[in-house]
Image (cartoon, helix red, strand yellow):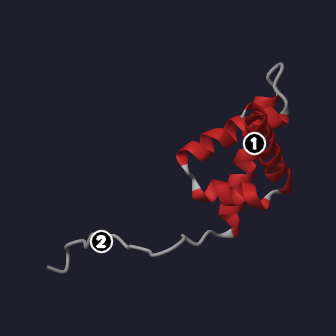
Amino acid sequence: MKDKVKWYYRFHFGKKKRSIFDYAKLGTILNLGIGALSLLPGVDRKDAFNFVDSIQLKTNSDFLNEYIINDMEFLSYRLERELNKAIREWEDA
């Protein structure tokens, strides 16, 4: 009986704790991805971020959303996009 492996799943309540290394990895991947997309002709950094952020909002990734909210550049891009969208909707009404 001692040779049997116990399989179990640990359930966590609330938000998962992330380490500084998790944030560093995400930041590196996100910045490299947005930088690579912005190298395409006719695509600037803001457009590349807006593409990634729109996908993120549809998938509801809490970890990526938390990173974006804490990054001033990405947060300013999101705020500008959402404010422009609200102004367009108000003018159309």
Q: Give the mark toward the camera: 1 or 2.
A: 1
For this orientation, the residue located farthest to the front is 93
Q: Secondary structure at mark 1?
A: helix
Task: Tell me where residue 36 sits by quadrant.
Answer: top right
Taking 48 as reference, is 16 left or right?
A: left
Q: Is residue 5 left or right of residue 17?
A: left
Q: Give the residue type at disc 1.
A: Ala
Q: Nearer the viewer, residue 33 or 55?
A: 55
Q: Which residue is mark 1?
A: 86
The residue most toward the left is: 1
The residue located at (59%, 58%) in the rendering is 62
Q: Amino acid at mark 2?
A: Tyr
Please provide percent x and percent y for residue 13: 45, 75
Separation (CA) of disc 1 from disc 2: 47 Å
- From the viewer's perspective, is residue 75 above or below residue 54? below
In the image, residue 92 above or below residue 25 = above
Above or below residue 56? Residue 13 is below
The label number, if any, that marks residue 23 in the structure image: none
- Whether residues under marks 1 and 2 lie with C-beta atoms below 8 angstroms apart, the answer is no
Looking at marks 1 and 2 on the same chain, the residue that comes earlier in the sequence is marked by: 2
**Residue in front for this viewpoint, 6 or 39:** 39
Q: Quadrant of the C terminus?
A: top right
Q: Residue at x 62, y 68 (%)?
A: 18
In the picture, the disc for residue 8 is 2
Name the quadrant containing residue 9: bottom left
